[in-house]
Image (cartoon, grey):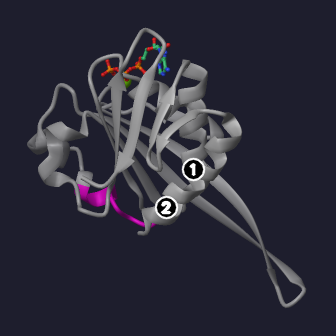
């Protein structure tokens, strides 16, 4: 997975949002709406199999970002399960139209989003919840809050997004690889 391409898209899109882009992969948002918008921009880049790791302190904006992402994907859920407070499952149906030799082909894609909150758990707990069965699979997208707590499970291809509290309304958000 090549996130460098995605990072470039981010830079372009956010230019229009007039967010303060400190450097290519760092943004400062000044409201929760802007942080949600950032999440929705990432959503547009997702194709399946991504693992998105969100790190940062309590109240730094990880859930706010995820809400923007889930909304943009028109995701349905969460579907409750015994683990609903650790792993929340959502379903997304994507309808892509491909032009091929003047004929249009419609491809329906269904995939699942797994939103994990690793704050109160460790790697062993997450493994027991079936992490290896869904993470990195072509029809799944995994978003992990407090991903630093289960770092040893995270493949090197994952996208890391660091959230930092600057002031009541300002958050510094940095995209990169760990
Ligand atoms: N620029 C901003 N970006 C994101 N949230 C903001 C911003 N400014 C203010 N806020 C507020 O900060 C809070 C962020 O909370 P959120 O639940 O997203 O944090 P979190 O990182 O998920 O925390 P936790 O680790 O406790 O789950 C919300 O109440 C939100 O309205
Ligand atoms: Mg949260």
**Residue hosting label 2:** 48
Q: In the rendered structure, which segment of residues is drawn in magenta?
A: 132-138
- Residue at image position (41%, 69%) is 1
Q: Is residue 135 magenta?
A: yes
Residue 9, x across and y down, in percent: 59, 56
Residue 116, x across and y down, in percent: 32, 37
Q: Is residue 74 visible?
A: no
Q: Is residue 146 above or below residue 43?
A: above
- Residue at image position (17%, 25%) is 120
- For this rendering, which residue is in front, 28 or 142? 28
Locate residue 24 relative to residue 125 in the image: left or right: right
Ligand 2 falls in quadrant: top left
- For this rendering, which residue is in front, 35 or 131? 35
Q: Is mark 1 within 8 Å of ligand 1?
A: no
- Closer to the chain start, of discs 2 and 1, is 1
- Residue at image position (48%, 25%) is 64
């Amino acid at each position: 997975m090549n996130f460098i391409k995605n990072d470039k898209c981010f830079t372009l899109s956010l230019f229009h949002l007039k967010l303060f882009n400190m450097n290519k992969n760092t943004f400062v948002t000044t409201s929760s709406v802007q942080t949600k918008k950032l999440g929705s921009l990432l959503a547009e880049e997702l194709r399946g199999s991504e693992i998105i790791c969100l790190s940062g302190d309590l109240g730094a904006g990880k859930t706010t970002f995820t809400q923007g992402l889930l909304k943009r994907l028109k995701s349905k859920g969460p579907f409750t399960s015994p683990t609903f407070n650790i792993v929340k499952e959502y379903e997304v149906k994507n309808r892509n139209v491909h032009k091929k030799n003047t004929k249009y082909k419609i491809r329906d894609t269904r995939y699942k989003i797994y939103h994990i909150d690793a704050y109160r758990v460790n790697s062993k707990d997450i493994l027991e919840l079936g992490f290896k069965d869904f993470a990195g699979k072509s029809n799944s997208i995994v978003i992990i809050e407090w991903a630093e707590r289960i770092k040893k499970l995270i493949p090197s291809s994952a996208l890391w997004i660091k959230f930092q509290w600057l002031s009541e309304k300002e958050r510094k958000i940095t995209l990169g690889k760990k």
